[in-house]
Image (cartoon, rainbow, N blue to C red):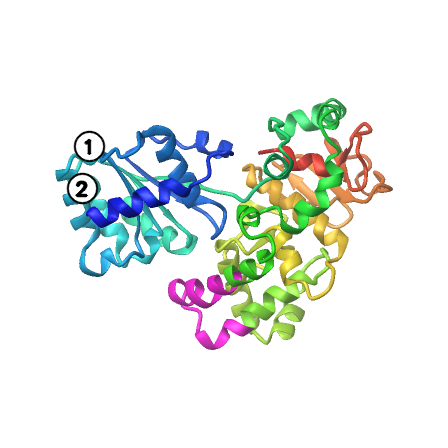
Amino acid sequence: MENLFRRHNAYLSTVPMEYVRDYMQQVNWQSRLIVIRGPKGVGKTTLMLQYIKKNFAPGDRHVLYCSADTNYFVAHSLLDLADSFVKMGGLWLFIDEVHKYPGWSREIKEIYDLYHELHIVLSGSSLIQINDGQADLSRRIMIYDMLGLSLREFLHLDVGIDIKPISLQHLLDKPAEFCMQVLSKCHPFEHFGRYLQFGYYPFYFEQKQEYYDKLENTINYTVDVELTKYRGLDVGYTRQVKALLHIISQMTPYEVDIAKLSKASGISRLSTLKYLNHLEEARLIRRLFTNLMTVTDLQKPDKIYLDNTNLLYTLSQEKPEIGTVRETFIANQLTSTKHTVEYAGYKKGDFRVDGDIVIEVGGQDKGFGQIAGQDKAYVAADDIEYAFGRKIPLWAFGFLY
């Protein structure tokens, strides 16, 4: 235990406190059992350590942070840890990378039932295993999905500009007013291109020169380790799945032809549909359908995007097609704020949001011809600073969270 506390203090001594994401306020930290899950690299560890540093005095032995992949767990169980910690008066136990501990959900359930005064906060990079593990904990656990940085958050970290988030409805109702507010502090379009390329994962600010290498390693880890271990992907097919990701990165955002996608990647049609489902679970891609109410796991998606534009720039062998970049950005920002996003349909617009809002995406000259006559229809236009009626700058959708 003493070694764990020494490591705990070492981690806290190096955690940055200059910027704490608003996401911290979305978590009900008083819940007895919390899981913070999200893609590798979005800042889950930093969030946990920042919460400890903000709310506990230095040297406080009522709180402990540790990682489930530390050597301590070679000879000890999670139950051993909790028992020893509670006997010492421990009240808050933070366990990082919990998915790397075999059978974690069963032991966490037992700890929860045995020690009623103990608050347990877990995090894990593998969304897939946490999804599986929650079955034993469904009546006990509070699950929070952590996202990468929005454009708004990137601006704060990169150039120190602090702007409050805006709801989608407020943006659609008063776009000109909001754009003027932002433009009074900066020219967001000046920074927008950098965000699209490397602004989504916070580790950019730690290792700028190695950003794409680290992101590519994260992609490889997800496919080589997580999908093989937790979704039964045959090791012999990992190269084909990576090829599938590369093909998606080069696709223009039109309706999907699964037969062509299957042939190009060397994967059967049924396996392609299955792998697309798993890749979305792992937050590497996003599938769009015309009607989410009738979707099944192996249904053909109408559109496929990578999860965020940074993945697009990492995986594309050439400069990504600008239309793909724009639509990937919009789909990411809207789904990140819990909006329902569907494919609007051929010649009806790019996205249908929350059932009745239609958004068409394009460049500065994009008009309303494709969405003419539709109520609640808007154009998200790149290369413009100001809003004109229902034509809203694309960058403005980066301030939703």
- What crowding class fits label 1: few (fewer than 14 Cα within 10 Å), some (14-19), or many (20 or more)? few
Q: Amino acid at mark 2?
A: Phe
Tag 2 residue: 85
Q: Position of residue 237 (x, y in %)?
A: 50, 74
The one of 181 and 356 positioned closer to us in this rendering: 181
- What crowding class fits label 2: few (fewer than 14 Cα within 10 Å), some (14-19), or many (20 or more)? many
Q: Could you tell me which residue is drawn at 67 percent across and 51 percent down?
A: 197
Q: Could you tell me which residue is drawn at 37 percent across and 51 percent down?
A: 130
Q: Which mark is residue 117?
A: 1
The one of 242 and 201 positioned closer to us in this rendering: 201
Taking the image as drawn, is residue 126 in sight? yes
Q: Which residues are magenta?
A: 219-239
60 is within the stretch colored magenta:
no
Q: Secondary structure at mark 1?
A: loop
Tell me: 336 left or right of 393.
Answer: left
Q: Nearer the viewer, mark 1 or mark 2?
A: 2
Vertical comparison of 101 with 390: above or below: below
Q: Position of residue 129 (x, y in %)?
A: 37, 55
Q: Secondary structure at mark 2?
A: helix
